């Protein structure tokens, strides 16, 4: 007989839902997934702004476009059209909920519609005023963007309440203490988690907090400081504030794979990866977690599980802090057969990692964990004009990049030359021209467009004797030339710059011959599949 827990005894689980999942699968989330955890857990939900089938046409993207219109007086009609579109899309979501809900919820949905109208009209007034003066401060832009998460939470909370589940909206737009120092270090995150914990404690514990993924105010702005993936970080901070053993990131894929399944058909779902591996995968092309999440959950000892909204019965992928102690993954209920869920591993974190070859006697035999690729890379080689010493030459190069707000993905250097793999300059002549012009004072500049970075990632790769040689010989056997090689101090990543047209071949042969995962037949020609873009975790 399963143990019946009191509300006070139940551990928290924090669930973060992305915009596309909320836009396409809201009934699955509010009628099936969230209720399945309530018997054994208190649930906190963190929401992104709702998107449709494409992220570029989602609420946040529309709000960013509205900001552009607001600083251009001649685009008033376009601004109003955007706000009307945002309002109408959320009305459609509420209408869909009405069709599924039991009779008697009319007032609830009318209130939700009224809340949507209020938010949109406040946004319209704010942006119209900004259009009059023709400018918006970074903090004002944050205020505009935060509307997306508020609208999303209004709808999610209404959906839960229409199913008889108490829920309340929690806005975090004013959760950050007003100071002049918003450096993203451990002190800042500890302070923010403490404020968040106190804030959440003011709400009823029997009601689900539906939390805006947007938090602020941050100086100069949340978008500038953290970027578009801020909802992941908010969810991690929420998990820390609630002392939740597990943070769940719900996406539209089964978890983290050994490679992008769209590019490598034989890619396999990984049961576990370390935080360090997840961070490297994110940086080199796979949107696993926002980079800021790792440090927050590592210090708290929180595990992260990536799960599929479309297949909630799946195990997903557990991301462990590599130095974490004993921790047991949670089940949905006392009965492990709920929703067809097989019993998840009961191993402690340390034992679970050892069993998967991260620690102990098996670590030297563990193959690399996964590989990923990043396209649209520009390779820049700078040969010193020998007018300064080596450290002065490198300082000049990086000062130029800093002035252009460009970050190098990979760097190799000698005393008088440096090679840079750049991903955020674009492959247009204007973007590349700015880089070349800036670097010409440092020396002779050569540029190669149409490149890609392929990264092989594994927690103990530095301890694998001959792994680099195996990767290089495998690529040579496939006729793939390497233009730049990099291995960071993290010891878990070897990255290579190759031609973009060779990327799919490189992924295929490394996956088969280095990771040791047999190929499966596919009817899609390699050439056709080679130009498929986009992250495999979204």
Image: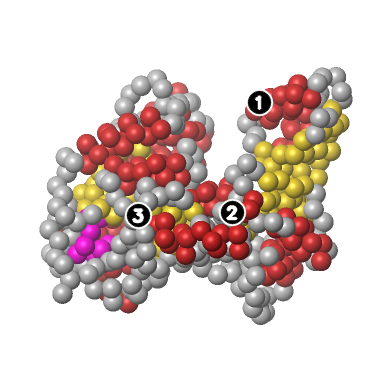
Mark 2–mark 1 distance (CA, rounded to whole Å)? 36 Å
Q: Earlier along the polypeptide chain: callout 1 or callout 3?
A: 3
Within 10 angstroms of label 1, few (less than 14), some, or many (20 or more) residues? few
For the question of whether residue 267 can be seen, the reply is yes
Question: At which x and y percent is residue 305?
Answer: 40, 58
In the figure, residue 318 lies in which quadrant?
Answer: bottom left
Give the residue at x 16% y 49%: 205
Within 10 angstroms of label 2, few (less than 14), some, or many (20 or more) residues? Answer: many
For marks 2 and 1, the one nearer the N-term is 1
Q: Is residue 227 above or below residue 508?
A: above
Q: Which residue is mark 2?
A: 460
Front disc: 2 or 1: 2
Left or right, 197 with reference to 463: left
Of residues 15 and 461, the one nearer the viewer is 461
Up the image or down, 374 lies above or below 134; here it is: below
Q: Is residue 149 left or right of residue 78?
A: left
> In the rendered structure, does residue 517 fall within the stretch colored magenta?
no
C-alpha separation, residue under disc 2 versus residue under disc 3? 21 Å
The answer to the question of whether label 2 and label 1 lie on touching residues, with beta carbons closer than 8 A, is no
How many neighbours does mark 3 have within 10 angstroms: few (below 14), some (14-19), or many (20 or more)? Answer: few
Q: Which residues are magenta?
A: 33-43
Which numbered marker is on residue 403? 1
| Residue at 34% in and 65% down | 346
State the SS at label 3: loop
Q: Residue 60's spot in the image, x, y percent? A: 44, 46
Residue tagged 3:
326
Which of disc 3 and disc 2 is earlier in sequence?
3
Give the position of the N terminus as an image quadrant: bottom left
Rendered location of residue 19, percent (x, y): 41, 54
């Amino acid at each position: 007989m399963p143990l019946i827990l009191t509300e006070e005894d139940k551990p928290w689980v924090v669930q973060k839902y992305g915009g596309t999942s909320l836009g396409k699968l809201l009934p699955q989330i509010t009628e099936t997934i969230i209720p399945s955890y309530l018997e054994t857990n208190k649930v906190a939900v963190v929401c992104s702004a709702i998107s449709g089938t494409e992220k570029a046409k989602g609420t946040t993207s529309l709000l960013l476009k509205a900001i552009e219109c607001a600083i251009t007086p001649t685009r008033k009609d376009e601004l109003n059209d955007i706000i009307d579109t945002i309002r109408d899309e959320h009305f459609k979501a509420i209408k869909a909920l009405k069709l599924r809900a039991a009779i008697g919820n009319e007032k609830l949905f009318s209130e939700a519609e009224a809340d949507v109208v209020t938010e949109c009209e406040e946004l319209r007034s704010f942006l119209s005023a900004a259009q009059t003066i023709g400018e918006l401060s970074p903090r004002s832009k944050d205020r505009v963007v935060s509307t997306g998460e508020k609208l999303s939470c209004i709808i999610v909370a209404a959906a839960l309440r229409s199913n008889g589940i108490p829920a309340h909206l929690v806005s975090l737009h004013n959760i950050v203490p007003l100071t002049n120092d918003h450096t993203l270090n451990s002190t800042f995150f500890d302070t923010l988690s403490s404020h968040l914990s106190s804030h959440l404690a003011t709400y009823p514990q029997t009601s689900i907090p539906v939390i805006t993924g947007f938090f602020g105010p941050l100086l100069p702005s949340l978008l500038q400081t953290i970027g578009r993936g801020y909802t992941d970080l908010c969810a991690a901070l929420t998990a820390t504030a609630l002392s939740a053993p597990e943070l769940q990131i719900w996406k539209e894929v089964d978890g983290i794979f050994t490679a992008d399944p769209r590019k490598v058909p034989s890619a396999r779902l990984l049961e576990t990866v370390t935080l360090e591996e997840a961070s490297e995968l994110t940086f080199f092309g796979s949107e696993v977690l926002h980079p800021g999440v790792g440090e927050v959950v590592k210090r708290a000892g929180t595990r992260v599980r990536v799960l599929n909204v479309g297949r909630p019965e799946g195990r997903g992928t557990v991301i462990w802090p590599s130095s974490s102690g004993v921790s047991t993954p949670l089940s949905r209920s006392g009965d492990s057969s709920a929703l067809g869920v097989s019993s998840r591993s009961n191993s402690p974190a340390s034992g679970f990692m050892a069993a998967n070859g991260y620690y102990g006697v098996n670590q030297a035999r563990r193959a690399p964990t996964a590989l990923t690729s990043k396209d649209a890379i520009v390779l820049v080689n700078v040969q010193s004009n020998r007018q300064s010493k080596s450290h002065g030459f490198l300082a000049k190069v990086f000062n130029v990049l800093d002035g252009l707000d460009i970050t190098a993905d990979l760097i190799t250097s000698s005393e008088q030359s440096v090679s840079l793999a750049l991903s955020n300059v674009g492959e247009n002549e204007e973007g590349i021209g700015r880089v070349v012009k800036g670097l010409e004072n440092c020396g002779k500049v050569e540029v190669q467009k149409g490149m890609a970075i392929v990264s092989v990632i594994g927690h103990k790769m530095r301890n694998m004797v001959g792994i680099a040689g195996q990767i290089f010989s495998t690529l040579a056997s496939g006729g793939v030339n390497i233009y730049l090689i990099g291995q960071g101090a993290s010891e878990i990543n070897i990255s290579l710059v190759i031609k973009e047209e060779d990327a799919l071949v490189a992924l295929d042969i490394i996956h088969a011959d280095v990771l040791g995962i047999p190929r499966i037949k596919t009817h899609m020609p390699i050439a056709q599949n080679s130009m498929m873009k986009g992250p495999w975790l979204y």
